[in-house]
Amino acid sequence: MKIMHVSFSLNMGGLENVILNLCGGLNKGKFSQSVCVLSDELGLKTQFDESNIPVVSFSKKNGIDLNLVLRLKKFFRDNPADIVHTHNPTALLYGGLAAVLSGKKLVHTEHSNLMQGKKLMNFAESLLFRMVRGLVCDTEEVKQSVHKNQGISLDKIKVICNGVDVKKFCLDDMDSLPAGLPADRHGRQGRLRGNDRGNGDDKKVFTIGTVARLALVKDQKSMINAVQILKEKGRNVKLVIAGDGELKNVLMDHAKKCEVENCVEFLGERMDIADILKSFDAYVLCSLYEGMSVSLLEAMSSSLPCIVTNVGGNVELIKDGDNGFLIPVKDPDAISACVEKLIDDPVLCETMGQANRKLVEEKYSLRVMCREYEKIYEEVC
């Protein structure tokens, strides 16, 4: 069975990593896959090339590009696929319409509720959703949003949670750290204990970290503010931020303004995230809104306690006080308070991390996600 994925971008991001994981995790004896990218954003193309997954870019023009629908329609007819699988609204509007016009069976995954409140987009999506053979959402919240905003019956929507490679994101093989991290950080095998963990002037540092694009919606500014609060309390902490984006210089300037530039490290965009996570003592995600965060799942799979905002898919993954902490958005005081709890209670730190690992292995593994999508594809065909 031939599956043609359609995405707006192939840059580093959660949605794009889901597609990459699907391409690597589906049964290769039953499914062959390829990817159409509407834009020229191809940051992950090398990873797809290494997996022998064909990738074609269509260089979408800015704004509305009606000619793109015709080009996609021709491409779908010239390159037969049993199913066109679109990801998120823009891919649906162009790729979904082209798929319907070319007589292809259509599967769509809604990875977030970004279009909530945008009436024109909601109307367009509601029409195309009725032509979709298999409609998937990655969280229960997104499913309810689609039901409310596009009027789709709940029994027509399947929830398939994102999944991650639990063999790749784990605590094994921790003998070496990735390049670019401080030499005095010894990874999770050197996790600090008791009063030596991030207190006073002790050289041992408690490391909190995050992996996300540097954008307003990810609110790394609140993390920096939390580090400032912790520093003022005499806590020896470090914030490591992996990711790139339009706010990099703004955030670096903010760290200087808060006089914590020596406590905040910007790694830029990295491909060795599994190794970088091993150097964290806790994971922080301060998104203003969020779907089913792949980066959060990767941190959980890596046995990290997690501090996350009380939004979107976060609340489906983290139970406050059990496997992490749920906090209000834009609340540096809440972040710092949770970090202090983890510093002061190493047993809590470990038990939360273990609970996260167990949860991902049972419900959010790549294997579980891929088997669920295979069922959808087989039902549609």
Image (tube, grey):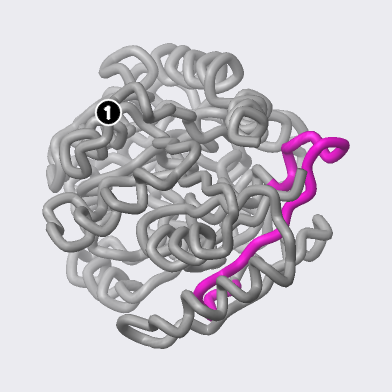
Q: Position of residue 221 (x, y in %)?
A: 22, 59
- Can residue 29 be found in the magenta stretch? yes
Say if 273 sits above or below 169 in the image. Answer: below
Query: As drawn, is 300 to the left or to the right of 34?
Result: left
Count the marks: how many? 1
Q: Quadrant of residue 34?
A: bottom right
> What residue is drawn where x is 50% and y is 68%?
9
Q: Position of residue 265 (x, y in %)?
A: 43, 61
Q: Amino acid at mark 1?
A: Ser
> What residue is drawn where x is 24% and y is 42%?
234
Task: Say which quadrant the N terminus sits in.
Answer: top right
- Where are the magenta residues, as a range? 23-42
Say if 120 sits above or below 21 in the image. Answer: below
> What residue is drawn where x is 71% and y is 37%?
168
Report which residue position mark 1 lands on.
153
Q: Position of residue 280 (x, y in %)?
A: 50, 40
Taking depth in this image into account, of 275 and 47 the one nearest to the observer is: 47
Q: How many neighbours does mark 1 have within 10 angstroms: few (below 14), some (14-19), or many (20 or more)?
A: few
Query: As drawn, is 176 to the left or to the right of 57?
Result: right
> What residue is drawn where x is 63% and y is 44%?
274
Say if 135 sits above or below 7 in the image. Answer: above
Task: Say which quadrant the C terminus sits in.
Answer: top right
Taking depth in this image into account, of 240 and 49 the one nearest to the observer is: 49
Asked whether residue 220 is in view, the answer is no
- Can residue 140 be found in the magenta stretch? no
